[in-house]
Image: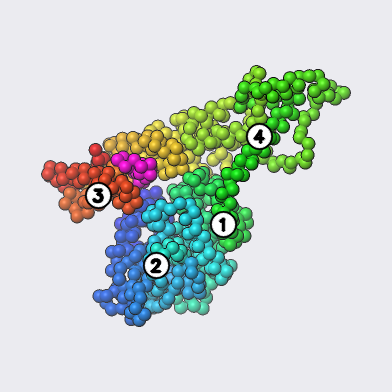
Amino acid sequence: MSSTTGCPSDETFTRLVEGLLAEDEMRALEAHCDGCLTCARTLAELARAISPSGGAGSGLLGDRYRLLEPLGAGGMGVVYAAFDTKLSRKVAVKRLRETGVGTPAEKRRGRFLREAQLLASLSHPNVLTVHDVGGADRELYVVMELVDGASVSGWLVATRPRWRAILDVFLQAGRGLVAAHQLGIVHRDIKPDNILVAKNGRVLVGDFGLAGLAGNLTPAGDATPENAAAAPSSLTQTGTVLGTPAYMSPEQHDGKPGDALSDQFSFAVSLYESLHGRRPFAGRTASEIATATRSGQLAPGGDGVPHALDRVLSTALQPDPGRRFASMEDLLRALERAAAARPAVGWAIGAIGLLLLAAGAFGVRGRLHHGATPSMTVAPPTAAAKTTAAKAEKPEAAPLKPADGTAPPPVVPTGPTPTKHRKQVAQGALPAQAGQVPAIVTQAQLLARAEHHLHRREGAACLAALGEHVGEWSEEVAPRAQTDRGNCELLVGHCAEGKKLLEPSYLNNRTYAPNAAEGLLSAQVARMCPAASFPTVEKRVLAVSLQASLASSDAANQSAWCGSLQRTLIADTQSAEVQGCFAKIAATRQATKECSLLLHDLDEAYRFVTECFLRDKNCREGARLDVMHSQVGFRAIAVDDKRVNLFCRPERIVEVYTTCAAAGEEAERKCLDHIEDARRAGDAMVTPAFPR
């Protein structure tokens, strides 16, 4: 395969179809396609291009199943729609792609048979049913029920459901996993693409191709078809890393065999991503994702999803398996409770607010007797406050001093003394204005206020909040304060200063390998600094891609933020670097490694910025970006190519945002006019051009 940062070569896909790809290359390809829309589409097209040798032209598969059409390609085989001539029903047939010989081929066939055996042992409405398994040598296949529906990934795009509908789908899938775990079966590759949503509402977990019997993985040699039935527990060699990196648990990344707690982690990653539209752990490569999962630092929540659900998922996403829920069943119960408790949230917040007001009043009254605690929040004194202050000035109201002349001990509320957490902080030293009643603001509250502005990408307001603190931060919160300041400096464009402030939290973190720490720090800078401030086209395009993908977390800032990203993106598309890459592809039909990486990031940037404008109901700009995204995906096309309509197709509008159909048609027409102008001018090829 090519570099992990670029797209695979044509040779890699050719060897995949021929069954000659080694297992490590297969895992790398699957990981890449999981995060690369272009290559994922290529893989899907390959599946459709493969002509089944057991189809209508050459008789029936197993003298029973007539293959109809390919439905998709997975890590181990190609799935076809088929007709069961014996029972007169449509089914799905999964055929092993492996056509090679030797130990790797035998191992793959052994895993394929194991999948069939494991699935056949499960009988649950939320698990895909296996009807039959057959073949020999190179003609292995599994016959399953045919689901009229789509994967969760496709379902989310097609229906754009609310959080409760998403949760209901995953609760069904979770019940299927509970049934599997009760039989000692571990899936080991839970992700949205392996959960199917039927049109009748039924949800099924499929593709147990990486499943193993919990606790029974053997360190023995590779399994083969001959001994598969005799040793159903020998799914894989102990320590082998199986799964899709973006959804794998930290222990799986470390090469440890997965178990039910690993499935719980992958399930939680999938649910979090489906609810929020982004994964809980950032990373563009398997190593970056592994480092992020070990840190346990989740992406911010929001998006209208109840915080109670995020709190439950944060437990299931703990790096230490021992800190997760004891079982999938416990996780499902916690999710159901969190969803059911949501209507009471407003009442609870109101009650807590009243308690805090009462506690604040009590605290102020006590401190008026013993000197004012400096405050950041000030307000004109009320009549009651003036009366209280006047009483506090009377000699008889002052506390008695100890005989030794030392300062009096602080007054504390009566009642049980609360147990302090080791991370509780001291009161902030904030000055109060003369003549005003001081309020009590802890350093933690001040940081929370700054982080609120940080989440909304209000860098100046964030710095202003931090600047209201006078003196040193307490030891407990000093690292957090420095990290917040670093991020706020990035937001206002002070990129070098912000990066310097953030370096300790990354480079001194022992959970990060040095290279991973540098990469994560660079990614954070790219997410936070204004995209236009980066010195090179490559870095600006990457920053636009990362930031546009985050824009969905803050609807209030979406228009302004994405408008700025759009301007930077269009300017860089017209740059000599990008146009030079398009010209090379038009002339030679090939792209250098550097061009491939740049244009891949450009494609991602257009995809996310398009989504931002369409979600904000800006049809005109969204349509123009949507058409440009299709062009960037093609990179260049011959003016007489039969696919020329796809080159100008507003894909997101056609598939999802149908209310913008008129704007999409207008942008598509202008793109086709551009191609027609090129044809009349005698040009053989045309490259992306932003519709005017």
Q: Is disc 1 surrounded by few (<14), some (14 to 19) or many (20+) residues within 10 Å?
A: some
Q: Are the residues flagged by discs 2 and 4 in contact, CB closer than 8 Å?
A: no
Q: Residue at x 65, y 18 (%)?
A: 434
Q: Are marks 3 and 2 in contact (CB under 8 Å)?
A: no
Q: Position of residue 27 (x, y in %)?
A: 43, 59
Provide the residue designation for mark 1. 336
Give the label, 2 or 4, closer to the camera. Answer: 4
Q: Nearer the viewer, mark 1 or mark 3?
A: 1
Where is mark 3, residue-wise?
Answer: 647
Q: Secondary structure at mark 4?
A: helix
Q: Nearer the viewer, mark 1 or mark 4?
A: 4
Identify the mark at residue 357; answer none if there is no mark: 4
Quadrant of the snapshot with the N terminus: bottom left
Label whose residue precedes the other's in the sequence (2 or 1): 2
Residue at mark 1 to residue at mark 3: CA–CA distance? 45 Å
Cα gap from disc 3 to disc 2, whole angstroms: 32 Å
Other-residue count near label 3 (Cα within 10 Å), few / some / many at <14 / 14–19 / ≥20 = many
Query: Which amino acid does the dot numbered 2 rest on?
Result: Val
For marks 2 and 4, the one nearer the N-term is 2
Check disc 4: other Cα within 10 Å, few if <14, some if 14-19, many if 20+.
Answer: few
Viewer-proximal residue among 338 and 185: 338
